[in-house]
Amino acid sequence: MTLHFRFRAALLVAICLTASACIFPIKRVAPQGTTVTAVVPNNDGWTGVASDADRDRINRTALAWQLGLAEARERGFRDAIRSEGKLLVSGGGLARPAPTPGSYRCRLVTLGRSGKRGPAFERFKPFFCYIDVEGDLFTIVKQTGSQRPAGRLWADQIATRMIFLGSLALGNEEEARAYGADPRRDVAGVFERIAPFVWRLVIPFAQDGTTLQVFELTPVPEQPKT
């Protein structure tokens, strides 16, 4: 390979990374060296799986952003919202939202409460979650805590987002129930990429009364041993 060819190849890669104008095949490798191939379905089949209540929640995501941010600002959390940067910017989803399988450092920020009970803005300690591939769908599992959402990501007609459908595992339960098995535990939301290597999962009108739950997901090479 000549020096001139190497320079042209390096320049092409730099342009693609800067402008996000190119798509290269990516080999995704899970922990323990297991190779996995992620396929994002080219349809919005989630609408045939989601309950009427959850389809309604997802369709009102923009309203949840509006109400949650307005309440938090009104109750004195403007600086806290600003400090979160892109995480709490409504409509900030970027192209190619599909994540890479692996371990993630996750944290939760909540906005607004129904009935004005509880804080209008709350930040929780970071935890770890894991993204994997099951069949042709991505899966997300929160691995610690008393309430651990787990579910699947579905492609959507809106190219900048995916749809999350899952449920909660509580207490010492080893795994969450299947989505739809107990509607009181069902969780539905919108999954977006908001920056290079940063994703968020937005749960509108959560069943615990929170107007908006926003999970931030940042990949880590390996989870610390507990």
Image (cartoon, rainbow, N blue to C red):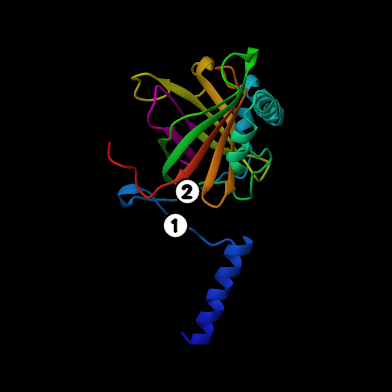
Q: Is residue 196 left or right of residue 27?
A: right
Whole-angstrom CA distance, mark 1 to mark 2, is 10 Å
Disc 1 crowd, CA 10 A, few/some/many (<14, 14-19, 20+): few
> Which residue occupies 72% across, 27% down?
63
Marks 1 and 2, the one that precedes in the sequence:
1
Residue 107 in the image: x percent, y percent?
A: 47, 35
Q: Total of numbered circles in the picture?
A: 2
User: In front: 122, or 13?
Assistant: 122
Is 24 located above or below residue 199 in the figure?
below
Disc 1 target residue: 27
Is 200 located above or below residue 52 in the figure?
below
Disc 2 crowd, CA 10 A, few/some/many (<14, 14-19, 20+): many
Disc 2 target residue: 100
User: In front: 147, or 37?
Assistant: 147
- Per the rendered image, the range of residues in magenta is 131-151
Q: Secondary structure at mark 1?
A: loop
Residue 67 in the image: x percent, y percent?
A: 70, 25
Q: Which SS type dominates the magenta stretch? A: strand
Residue 176 in the image: x percent, y percent?
A: 42, 24
Q: Is residue 37 left or right of residue 86?
A: left
Disc ID at residue 193: none
Q: Is residue 177 visible?
A: no
- Placement of the C terminus among the 4 image quadrants: top left
User: In front: 42, or 172?
Assistant: 172
Residue 29 belongs to the span the image colors magenta: no
- Furthest toward the left, the residue is 225
> Which residue occupies 66% across, 26% down?
68
Mark 2: amino acid: Thr
Q: Secondary structure at mark 2?
A: loop
Residue 15 in the image: x percent, y percent?
A: 61, 69
Mark 1: amino acid: Lys
Residue 132 belongs to the span the image colors magenta: yes
